[in-house]
Amino acid sequence: MNNALQIQSVGSFPTLSGEKIVNVTVVATNQIASIVDSNLLMGDNVVVVPLNATNVTIVPPTANTAIVTIKGNAADIGVKLHKTQPSSLSIDPATTSFILNVSANSSGWEFTFI
């Protein structure tokens, strides 16, 4: 049985010189397909990554107002994510966790790992 999962997305984006077509394919040889619903507390929240996951989509609550920053460790300055739009990241399969720092308690987060 083949456990490969492939997700493909094609989009067209306007640029200064015309149009750019982007074709993105994500392939996961081990179907993790883990969806985790979570509530986050103000400050650093450790998100545990399932074994061998290579992608994560972080979906904040639609009405989220908290500032959210993704970090590799507690000392990291991190990168701010959009408050209400999903963020998808490719991660190294050896990754065991990452940190989401939020500026206020926030409920209804979803993490999808493949």
Image: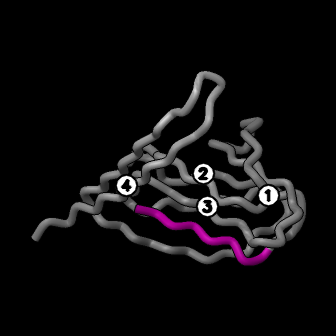
Type of amino acid under label 1 = Lys
Local packing at callout 2 (Cα closer than 10 Å; few below 14, some 14-19, many 20+) is some
Q: Position of residue 39 (x, y in %)?
A: 73, 75
- Cα–Cα gap, marks 2 and 4: 25 Å
At label 3, which amino acid type do we have?
A: Ile
Corner quadrant of residue 42: bottom right
> Which tag is nearer the camera, tag 4 or tag 3?
4
Q: Which stretch did the figure color magenta?
A: 107-114
Between 67 and 63, the residue placed more toward the observer is 63
The single residue placed furthest to the front in the displayed view is 18
Give the labeled residue for mark 1.
83
Neighbourhood count class around disc 3 (C-alpha, 10 Å): few under 14, some 14–19, many 20 upward: some
The residue identified by callout 2 is 98
**Between marks 1 and 2, how big is the CA–CA gap?**
18 Å
N-terminal-most mark, 1 or 2: 1
Instruction: Please check the rendered image and state whether residue 100 is part of the magenta-colored stretch, yes or no.
Output: no
Q: Is residue 48 left or right of residue 73?
A: left
Is 109 colored magenta in this rendering? yes
**What is the CA distance from the residue labelled 1 to the residue labelled 3?**
11 Å
How many C-alpha atoms fall within 10 Å of the one at disc 4: few (<14), some, or many (≥20)?
A: few
For marks 1 and 3, the one nearer the N-term is 3
The kind of secondary structure element at disc 1 is loop
Mark nearer the viewer, 1 or 2: 1
Q: Pick the quarter of the image with the C terminus.
A: bottom left
Counting residues from the start of the chain, the first of labels 3 and 2 encountered is 3
Q: Residue at x 40, y 51 (%)?
A: 54
Where disc 3 sits, the SS reads strand
Q: Nearer the viewer, residue 101 or 67?
A: 67
Q: Residue at x 75, y 52 (%)?
A: 82
Mark 4 belongs to which amino acid?
Gln
Q: Residue furthest top?
A: 17
